[in-house]
Every structure is written in C-alpha cells, then in structure tokens.
Amino acid sequence: MAAVVEPVRLDDAFMQDPHAVAEVFRREGPARPVVMPRGLRGWVVTGYHEARALLADPRLSKDAGRISELFETQVDHRDGEESPRTFASALTAHMLNSDPPEHTRLRKLVNKAFTPKSVERLRPRIEQITDALLDQMEAAGGEVDLLETFAFPLPITVICELLGVPEAERAAFRDWSNTLVSADPAAPIEQAAGELVTYLRELIERKRAEPGPDLLSDLVQVSEDGDRLAEHELVPMAFLLLVAGHETTVNLIGNGVLALLRDPEQLAALRADPALLPGAVEEFLRLDGPVNLATLRFTAEPVRVGEVEIGAGEFVLISLLAANRDPARFEDPAKLDVKRPAGGHLAFGHGIHYCVGAPLARAEAEIAIGRLLARFDGLALAGEPSRLRWRASTLMHGMEQLPVRLG
Ligand code: HEM
C-alpha cells in the first residue's frame, strides 16, 4: 500500500527555513509525492541533476489552462461580468505559463530588450539611481531598513522606467504586486488583481494614444516578422515583466547582503578583491535564490525521475531552492563561498523558460552590492536577530526587513 503523504504545511516554520523542509524531502530521493495545502497532489523534485533535466524536458508542460486553475482556486468565485476568476486568468496567461509555439512567439517579442547588450546600455542609469539612493541613505545616516531604502526602490525604478510606468503611479503598483505574491489567506488578492488589470488596460491605452520611448509603447506597436500582440496578451506580458522586476531582484540584493553580513570572512574577501563580485552574485543566487516554490510544470507524458515513475497529467513542483543546495552537485552547499567556481545554479531556471531578465538582474545586483560596500565600509547588521524574518510568500524567498547600521 502506498504510504500516506502528509500535506506540506506552508506555515511560518516553512517560510523561516524552507531549506530544512527540502532536506527532509531529499532524504526520500530526488523526487517524492507531495500534497499541497489546497489538496493538490503532485510531485516535488529536489535533486539538482533531475531538476535541471526536467526543466529542459519537452514532456513537461506549463499547461496554461491548469496553471490558471491553480491561481483561480486562490480567489473566490463571484458571479458578475468580470469575476475575480477572469481577472486572475487575465494576468496569468503570459509566456511563463505557456508552451511552444505561443511561448516562442511571445518570448521573441521581448528578448531583444533584455540581451546583455541592451542591458549594458542601461548600466549608467542603474548606477545613477543606485548612487542617488546611497546619497539619501548617507545623509540620513545611522540605522536603516536596507530593503525599504535601497533593495526595493532600485529594481522598481529601473523596471518602471524601462516599461514606462509614470512615477506617481508606482506606489500603487507596488502594493498590488505585494498583495498578489502574499501567502496570507486574508490578503485582498481578488481586489488587487482587479484593480491591477484595470490599471494595466488603461496604461496600455495611454501608450497606444501617446507612445513614449519605453518598452510598453514598443510592445503595443511591435511587430516581429509582422507579428503583433493582442490586448489580451499585452496585459499579462506587462504584468509578468513588472512583477518579475519588482519582486525578485530586491531579494537577490537583500539575501546577498544578509549572507555577506553574516559571514565576516567572506565579506572581507569580497571587499579585498571587488573583481570577485560577479562570481559572488552567482553564489548569492545559488545559496538563497529569490524564488521560493514558483517553478510549476505538468507532465504531458509519463516521465521517470530516479526511482519514481510519474504518470501523464501530474503536477510537478521543481524546487530550485533545493536543487541549488544539492550535495550531489555542490560541495558544502549551505556554505557561502564567494570564490566558488561560478555557474551551474538553477536560480534563473533552465531551458526555454530561462529567465529573460537574468542579464538585468545580474547587472542591478552587481552595481547595487558593489557600490553599497564601497560607500559604507562599516556596514553591519543592526537590531535583534529576531527581527530578521523571511517573508510569508510561497513565490518569493526574501526578508521582511533588513535592518543595518551604515557605519
Ligand atoms: C522567468 C528567476 C529577475 C523576467 C524566470 C524563471 C526563474 C526566474 C526561475 C523561470 C521559471 C520557470 O521556469 O518556471 C528570476 C530571478 C530574478 C529574476 C531569480 C532576479 C534575481 C527577472 C527580471 C525580469 C524577469 C528583472 C524582468 C525584466 C522574467 C520573465 C520570465 C522569467 C519574463 C519568463 C520567461 C519565459 O517564460 O520564457 N525568472 N528572475 N526576471 N523571468 Fe525572471
């Protein structure tokens, strides 16, 4: 008889230490059955080699219909012309939730904006925004929450400028985005989704009427081999880019700085040789990447993972967090080592959905962390260690706040 699988509890203990839960799973092999809190049954993959192979395996599908069902179960259904369900699908029908050929087509339309060459052109502006934030922090002095004052505003400003979201509208966007990734069942998800869809539709209309020098205006007009994006594709595309730009890089900067401040030897090594910075950013991504439980797939055909046979139509959660600390791939995986040979981590995913924003995220983190360390040579954690709590989010792995002394 099959063993009874206890539902995973996405409770505070999990949020505070998802690695501990992953270690327990890993002992049962690279893939094991899982029951999610809403009774959804599937499999969780914790092995590095298995995760990497599955991410590139065409037998695994995003199955847009089933993914939007997953999100829809998170909001109550209400009758009416535009129910919360409609709003949820209106946001989630984007390239990350689609398979080829739609995926290939959508991705081609934005690829160009995020190539290393395009990102290189953004560098001076990213440096300017970073320095302005550091100036403000220096003027205020003393103790600050580094997330609030630095790690949040930097990527938000960059992605909003890139897409053309006017400054006065950014605070509202941040609130909606925060609500949507929250794990709190009381969070007003349906209301936030509804308001956001309305906002994005209206913003797109403005870009159509008065195009500006921004990516959203380009997307409204683009044609790649004569191809155009329809309205129902533009809203989720704008949503995906804005949320990815808001919720991820902040945690790369936050988790990276936290790891360094907890390890004075590694911090000193990086300070002594700033050329280590690009490799250190890769190590931050490996050690505590910004994505929590977000990589979902469905099997379109049966697949074998290690000893287990996963049938067709099953839900598969590929844990990047667990894969990146698999001792079968990384020696002493829980240890921060800024000199570790870079490469190989799965924090940006792998295969056709590999993060389109990776060059931008890397550039932002290198500039932010490099300049932060150069500006404040006495930077240290402040306050009680109990204030260092991970946020309750099933999607994102980042701190609630990061109190530091600027020194
Ligand atoms: C896809 C992580 C920053 C835009 C992904 C995936 C991961 C990821 C793991 C693949 C998920 C899957 O296969 O299911 C990250 C991390 C970031 C980051 C760790 C920061 C450190 C960004 C930024 C942007 C962005 C700044 C936007 C400009 C996207 C998009 C996709 C994606 C559009 C979907 C790609 C596709 O489906 O082909 N990201 N991301 N990401 N990311 Fe990022």
Image (tube, rainbow, N blue to C red):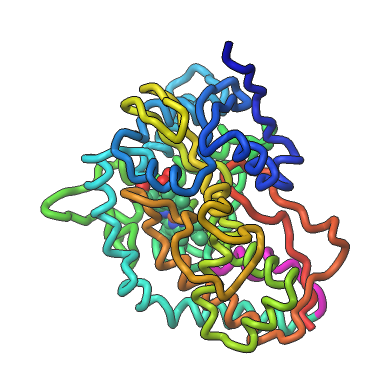
Q: Is residue 242 visible?
A: no
* Residues in magenta, as a range: 142-154
Q: Vertically, is 161 above or below 317?
A: below
Q: Vertically, is 4 above or below 239?
A: above
Total numbered labels: 0
Name the one closer to the observer, 157 or 33.
Answer: 33
Q: Position of residue 322 (x, y in %)?
A: 57, 47
Q: Is residue 64 left or right of residue 142?
A: left
Q: Vertically, is 116 above or below 308?
A: below
Q: Position of residue 214 (x, y in %)?
A: 34, 65
User: What secondary structure is the magenta-colored segment mainly?
Assistant: helix
Q: Is residue 90 visible?
A: yes
Name the one closer to the observer, 244 or 166.
Answer: 244
Location of the C terminus (image quadrant): bottom right
Residue at (30%, 59%) from the top-left corner?
A: 217
Name the one closer to the observer, 282 or 203.
Answer: 282
Is residue 403 covered in magenta?
A: no
Location of the N terminus (image quadrant): top right
Q: Position of residue 229 (x, y in %)?
A: 24, 46
Residue at (57%, 63%) from the top-left corner?
A: 252
Residue at (70%, 40%) from the top-left corner?
A: 14
Is residue 150 covered in magenta?
A: yes
Q: In the rendered image, which quarter is residue 29 located in?
A: top right
Q: In the rendered image, which quarter is residue 187 located in?
A: top right
